[in-house]
Image (cartoon, helix red, strand yellow):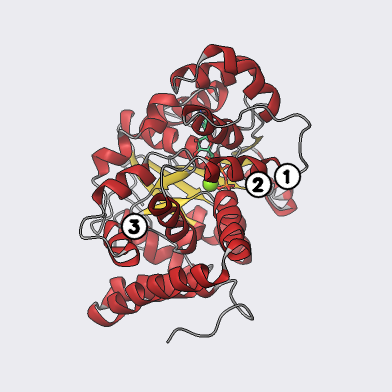
Amino acid sequence: MEGTAQSSIPLGDVLNSRRRRTFVGRRVERELVRAGLESADPQLSVLFLHGPGGIGKTTLLGEFAEIAAETGASVARLDGRDIPPSPSAVLAALGEAVDVPDTGAIARAEERLCLLIDTYEVLTPIDEWVRTQLLPRLPATALTVIAARTPPSSEWRSDAAWSELLRVVSLRNLTPQESREFLRAVAVPPPLHERICRATHGHPLALALLADVASRGGEVSADPLTPDLMAELMQRFIAVVPSPAHRRALEVCALARVTTEALLRDALGLEDAHEMFVWLRQLSFVDPGPDGLAPHDMARDVIDADLRWRDLDAYTDVFHRVCRHIRHSLLSCTGREQQRAIFDLKFVFRNLPGVLSPVE
Ligand SMILES: Nc1ncnc2c1ncn2[C@@H]1O[C@H](COP(=O)(O)OP(=O)(O)OP(=O)(O)O)[C@@H](O)[C@H]1O
Ligand SMILES: [Mg+2]
């Protein structure tokens, strides 16, 4: 969420991250949002973006946040990953992001609001409430962008009230030209561009990951193509990490919901984890968020499965160290921090039944 006080990463770092410098394409969508926010009589209230994992929805929302700030709008950014799917949780998260006055209307009418809701597919249980209760409470000039892996439910399209004000956009892979532009921006040597474009078909996450592999001297060709390209690319990345300690840091990051310097320090037994944190933060598949670093889901799954398969004892050890750190926060904080620690603990346990014994 923009402007969250508890941020463990300076906002400037987030805004200046390399994603901004390496962003390519999506011209139509960016113009749509800019025009919507600059128009005195906006014809667009909701832009619904959908597309598979790694296609670039979150990255594009980041661009929209920048555009909205440039137009002077106030930006509220919510992510379904961080909010339980209930109206009260969404309202609480929104209340932190924007001013909610006593009248019950969200944000003052004279203030242009740009509401960005990411990972909406996990908020499906409250889809009807969002459509019929939440969004109608926003000022008429507000622009909401929803990003989900799945298209909007049929009710969005069949509701006559929405038909004029809703645009649905399916995000696709980057074009070969955009893909090359990206590879130039991340300084991949031109002789490798053709092979990387062919291997990834312009899928942004695969492209970014293979660019990382290339910059570390790893193998970039992908012939024949495997059915699970992401898993294959992630394995290649794991093969070229600089040291066993870096691999361990990657594993901590894959297990925990979010990774902070303090977690890395505890989990890796380091006195100073700053360098390791900086290394993690610059990886193409790791996102810096307000609570800490989080790897992309697809990367998380592969790293997690790799460690479990390779060495269950090491996996158990990382798991216990991460849990100990979270339990310590749970006992030493209150209020919202404590809620977050509970959320973190549930996350760590989410796919463990039958694999490990409970934390000691
Ligand atoms: N337009 C873009 N320009 C440059 N790189 C991009 C672009 N879009 C995506 N990427 C790269 O692809 C990665 C994955 O994109 P992103 O996290 O936005 O996908 P997503 O659609 O939100 O996936 P998920 O559904 O799993 O959340 C980004 O971390 C970034 O490295
Ligand atoms: Mg995303």
Q: Which residue is mark 3?
A: 291
Dot 1 falls on a residue whose secondary structure is loop
Q: Which residue is mark 2?
A: 231
In the foreground, 240 or 290: 240
Q: Going 44% across and 68% down the picture, which residue do you hit? A: 318
Q: CA distance from mark 2 to mark 1?
A: 6 Å
Q: Going 37% across and 48% down the picture, which residue do you hit? A: 76
61 left or right of 98 in image: right
285 left or right of 199 in image: left
Q: Which residue is mark 1?
A: 228
Q: Going 51% across and 68% down the picture, which residue do you hit? A: 315
Q: Which mark is residue 253?
A: none
Position of residue 264 measured from the top left corner of the image (x, y, whole percent): 32, 60
Dot 3 falls on a residue whose secondary structure is loop
- In the rendered structure, which amino acid carries the disc numbered 2? Ala
Dot 2 falls on a residue whose secondary structure is helix
Q: Are marks 2 and 1 in contact (CB under 8 Å)?
A: yes
Name the quadrant of the C terminus. Answer: bottom left
Residue 52: image quadrant is top right
Position of residue 329 measured from the top left corner of the image (x, y, whole percent): 28, 75
240 left or right of 279 in image: right
In the foreground, 118 or 304: 304
Neighbour class for label 3 at 10 Å: few (<14), some, many (≥20)? some
Of mark 3 and mark 2, the one earlier in the sequence is: 2
- In the rendered structure, which amino acid carries the disc numbered 3? Asp
Q: CA distance from mark 3 to mark 2?
A: 27 Å
